[in-house]
Image (spheres, helix red, strand yellow):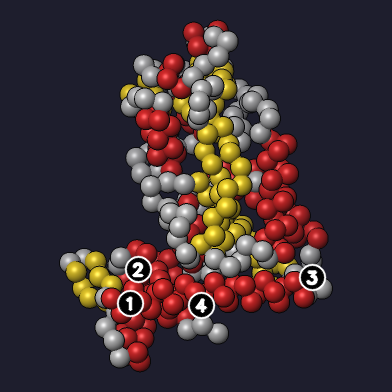
């Protein structure tokens, strides 16, 4: 088995503080500090140096992390090979994902696994994309559905395998009878002068809308904030502005709003990725989950009604 203290060092490197790494690992800060000191003493090199409220990795720590990435990836490949030899999956399997994925995509996949493999314990976790990567890195999740944000690891990050799974188009939601509903086609730029309803600053939804609007050539006039689709739709229904809603999100039918598919090149969409630890992608269980999710999405995405 690989020394678990290498995982501790990885989380410290990712977050830059002992406290944040401890939260991701469900450890106490003192336990994280102790393991770092212990590993440093056994290797005979200094691994971290205090730097204000954060810590800085030494060149020895960075070199060690490069080897750790290779070790963990090879360990995942070994487990994939062993799983292929088993009669059926056993143990536990955890899926995590952001709110829309956790609502519409993960439950069918988890249910299919549960019903097909009674010896497999399946668990679901709703989490923001950055938290999903923490769960993967800490070994608390096996597959994550994420969207790219400014805070998520780049595709080149050797700790993770991030594969495009599907594109989820963004629809514009306006009050019923809004002038844009009368147009044969609507682009995101057509709504540039509208008051906008966004998620809280720092949230994935906030980043999603800001990025889409800037790509369309404007910065949205933020009038109100709402973190739930139903709340945002209620604001729209009462004339407080417009929102962008992913096609996978389902809106409550009681609100008098119109959902308008957007055109343009490119049409705004969020790309959903399936992320695993590096080396684990070919796992039979992961392959089956990906296929179920893709099939589920194919049934959900063609419709734009609420």
| Among numbered discs 3 and 4, the one appearing first in the sequence | 4
Q: Quadrant of the C terminus?
A: top right
Number of the label disc, if any, that sits on residue 61: 1
Q: Could you say where residue 74 lies in the image, as x and y percent from the top left?
A: 57, 75
Structural crowding at the residue carrying mark 4, measured as other residues with C-alpha within 10 Å and reported as few (<14), some (14–19) or many (≥20): some
Marks 3/4: CA distance?
26 Å
Q: Secondary structure at mark 1?
A: helix
Q: Nearer the viewer, mark 4 or mark 2?
A: 4
Reply above or below: 298 against 94. Answer: above
Structural crowding at the residue carrying mark 1, measured as other residues with C-alpha within 10 Å and reported as few (<14), some (14–19) or many (≥20): some
Residue at the location (59% across, 32% down)?
247
| Among numbered discs 1 and 4, the one appearing first in the sequence | 1
Structural crowding at the residue carrying mark 3, measured as other residues with C-alpha within 10 Å and reported as few (<14), some (14–19) or many (≥20): some
Is residue 73 or residue 96 the one in the foreground? 73
Reply above or below: 257 against 27. Answer: above
Q: Could you say where residue 149 lies in the image, as x and y percent from the top left?
A: 42, 46
Quadrant position of residue 239: top left
Residue tagged 4:
71
Number of labels in the image equals: 4
Residue at the location (46% across, 26% down)?
243
Residue at the location (47% across, 84% down)?
3
Quadrant position of residue 271: top right
Residue tagged 3:
88
| Among numbered discs 4 and 2, the one appearing first in the sequence | 2
Residue tagged 2:
13
Reply above or below: 289 against 235. Answer: below
């Amino acid at each position: 088995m690989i020394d678990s203290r290498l995982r501790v060092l990885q989380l410290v490197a990712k977050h830059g503080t002992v406290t944040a790494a401890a939260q991701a690992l469900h450890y106490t800060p003192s336990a994280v500090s102790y393991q770092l000191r212990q590993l440093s003493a056994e290797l005979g090199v200094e691994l971290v140096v205090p730097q204000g409220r954060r810590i800085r990795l030494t060149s020895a720590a960075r070199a060690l992390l490069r080897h750790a990435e290779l070790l963990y990836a090879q360990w995942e490949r070994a487990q994939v090979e062993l799983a292929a030899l088993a009669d059926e999956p056993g143990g536990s399997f955890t899926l995590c994902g952001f709110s829309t994925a956790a609502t519409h995509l993960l439950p069918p996949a988890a249910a299919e696994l549960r019903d097909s493999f009674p010896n497999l314990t399946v668990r679901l976790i709703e989490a923001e994309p950055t938290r999903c990567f923490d769960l993967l890195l800490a070994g608390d999740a096996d597959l994550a559905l994420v969207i790219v944000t400014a805070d998520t690891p780049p595709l080149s990050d050797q700790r993770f395998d991030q594969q495009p799974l599907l594109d989820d188009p963004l629809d514009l939601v306006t009050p019923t009878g809004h002038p844009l509903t009368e147009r044969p086609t609507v682009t995101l730029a057509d709504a540039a002068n509208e008051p906008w309803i966004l998620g809280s600053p720092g949230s994935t939804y906030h980043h999603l809308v800001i990025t889409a609007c800037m790509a369309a050539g404007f910065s949205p006039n933020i009038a109100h904030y709402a973190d739930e689709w139903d709340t945002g739709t209620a604001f729209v229904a009462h004339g407080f502005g417009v929102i962008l809603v992913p096609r996978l999100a389902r809106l409550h039918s009681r609100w008098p709003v119109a959902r308008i598919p957007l055109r343009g090149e490119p049409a705004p969409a969020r790309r959903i990725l399936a992320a695993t630890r590096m080396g684990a992608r070919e796992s039979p269980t992961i392959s089956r989950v990906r296929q179920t999710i893709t099939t589920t999405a194919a049934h959900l995405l063609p419709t734009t009604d609420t």
